[in-house]
Amino acid sequence: MMRFVQLATIVGVFALLASVALAHGGQYSGPAGGGSSGGFAPAGAGTPGPGPGPAGGGTGSPGGTTGPVGSGTTGPGAPTPGSPGSPPGGTPAPGGTGTGVPGSGATPGGYRKPATDANLTWAAWWFFNDDKYLNLKAKIRSEENETDNADLFAGNAFGGDEVTKVNAKMIREQVNPILKLALKDPFFDTRAAALIALGKAGMPESLADLKTLMNDEHKQVRESSFLAMGILGNKEAIPTLVATMNDTTEARKWVDQTNGIDTRTRAFAALGIGLIGARENDLSDTQAVSALVDMMNAKENEKQRDLQIAPIVALGIMKAKEAVPALIKFFDDKSNQAWARAYAATSLAKIGDPAALDPITKGLKDKQNAVVQSCAMALGVLAKPEDKDAVDGLQKLTKSGADLGAKNFAIMSLAEIGGEENRNFIAKMTKKGNIFERSFSALGMGIYYYQNPNDATKGEICEDLHKFFKAEKNPDIRGANAIALGLMAYEPAGADILETLKDGGQASLRSHLCIALGLMRYTAATPEIRRTVSDKGDIDLRRSASIALGLMGDKEAVAVLQKEIEASENSLAVHGAVTQGLGFIGDRSAVPTLIKFLRERDKYQDSTRAFAAVALGLLGDKDDIPIISKISEHNNYLIRTDAIGEVLTIL
């Protein structure tokens, strides 16, 4: 579904490719992708070929895009890798990713230079896991100190009026009505975006509106309908979602697919069930969990791996404790496909049952790289510093593991687990090692001290990372150090980070510098970041700058962004960055402008209207951290399936 549009050529150095992931209400994702912190472009959601195969032994499907290092050959038409800010996309080949380290001989595909695969960089981990660290809306809402909103939205009932600057009355009377009008927009991406936005706004009565497009002529809109039901969180949608997932005769009529509902729509329905459960709804009086478990265990679904993996993911995000025995059994059964077993590991970790610790720790020695990767990631959620076998296994993996993806995940998990031993282990890696070890360990230090801000060693590590930032020439490592310093709120580094931002250079690095300055709230950088927002260059950089203004609580940010919209009313690129900036910041003064875009269809181009719907979804989102981030967080993004890969493009 990713559609690539050539936007600009930067001084003959590289082509700036912007992929418009608007379908399903997704976001403009420039070179850094996804409306996140910049510097990384997520792989597209290609169709995986049949599997499984040995670790690292897959081949890309025809017409696919470049997969991870060592994943085999790519199909024709893959974009050229290696351009700064435009790394390769594509769903990894089946049978494990085979991300071998230099000289390991671990993969048939061998080792390639890091620039050829953005999925293996620290920026990829940050991209898929940064929501809870940025948490922009919560920062802004807490600062506004407006009226108590505890009973405002679905999941918390309804009642009060204020949600920072966009209040419930405005959502009911202005935002939702225009989104309902957008459901009839002639452009399918606008309809899809409006569905997701209505789900985010969280008015329970919107369920009826979401159901009206279950049979839309465009597949992407139909899929969005079911995913939006999950985002909405209305428990009354469960029967509809279960029936669609199970491809019942009645559900086929709903979607006008008499010969059977397509795989991805069924997978989206399964994920919708999980999202409803993720709101801690009591689903014991429904068939939700049992239906998901049955779907996971159905052997016929192995041919369409999304029909196994989507239910597994759903069970994890809804923390279905009653499914733990079934998930452990599925994980331990090596006759099941490697990718499905890998997803079972991360879902077990998200559920948090201690019974999963032993099998997942043993999974660090599995013969399938995909399983090892997911177990390494899962232990960061499940293990504690005192779990010696898990900690020892992760440390050994970082030293001598054959799979680069697993090694990277192990570093991050040690940081998340915490404890003095792990802290010291990672700190040593920041001082020497290859590009991956130094960048991931730097980010790991940022994560560790973000979780342990009162650790007495924080000042010393901050000074070290600041020194490394100033001395380092590699922009990838510099970016990791900058984000780490931002997470640790180390303001003494602000002047040097700001000076580097002013010096220009690679857009992906500058994106990370903006976010770092925003995280540490280095307000002296505000004028330069405002100028960056107005810069006519890289689009993702402008979006990152917009987010940074919000992180710093810049009261004039909305005026700056609105001025940019007015200056380029029909610019796809500008609206992709700036309207999302308005949505991230969450100021109600942006609403009339966005409503105008959707109402005046003849005046504004299709993509502009779609971006406006996306931005209204951000503005009206009832959650500080988007509920859909529960899918991306601690997800093994190296083995994204068709459906999971598509969901991860949605903001």
Image: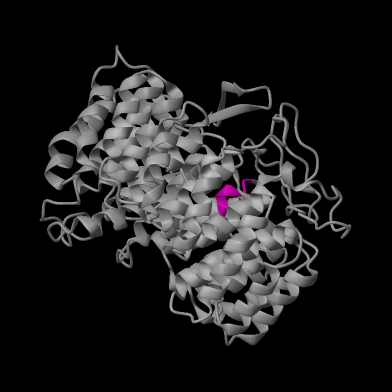
Magenta span: predominant SS is helix
Query: What residue appears at the point 54 percent right and 71 percent down from the top-left corner?
Result: 416
Query: In the rendered image of this protein, does residue 198 appear above or below residue 393?
Result: above
Residue 354 in the image: state x and y as whole percent.
Answer: 52, 81
- Does 317 lie within the magenta span? no
Query: Does residue 273 appear left or right of residue 439 in this picture?
Result: left
Residue 140 in the image: state x and y as whole percent.
Answer: 27, 53
Using the image as rendered, state which of residue 629 and residue 330 is in the foreground. Answer: 629
Using the image as rendered, state which of residue 224 and residue 284 is in the foreground. Answer: 224
Query: Which quadrant is home to the N terminus?
Result: top right
In the rendered structure, which segment of residues is drawn in magenta?
304-310
Query: Which quadrant is home to the C terminus?
Result: top left
When asked about the image quadrant of residue 253, the answer is top left
Query: What residue appears at the point 25 percent right and 36 percent down from the top-left corner?
Result: 209
Tell me if I can see residue 189 in this picture. Answer: yes
Tell me if I can see residue 222 in this picture. Answer: no
Residue 97 in the image: state x and y as whole percent.
Answer: 73, 52
Query: What residue appears at the point 75 percent right and 62 percent down from the top-left corner?
Result: 368
Query: In the rendered image of this protein, does residue 651 appear above or below residue 412?
Result: above
Residue 110 in the image: state x and y as whole percent.
Answer: 86, 50
Using the image as rendered, state which of residue 495 and residue 40 is in the foreground. Answer: 495
Query: Does residue 113 appear left or right of residue 5 in this picture?
Result: right
Q: How many marks?
A: 0
Query: In the rendered image of this protein, does residue 434 appear above or below residue 546?
Result: below
Query: In the rendered image of this protein, does residue 6 appear above or below residue 86?
Result: above
Q: Residue furthest top?
A: 602
Query: Does residue 273 appear left or right of residue 383 in this picture?
Result: left
When asked about the image quadrant of residue 187, the answer is top left
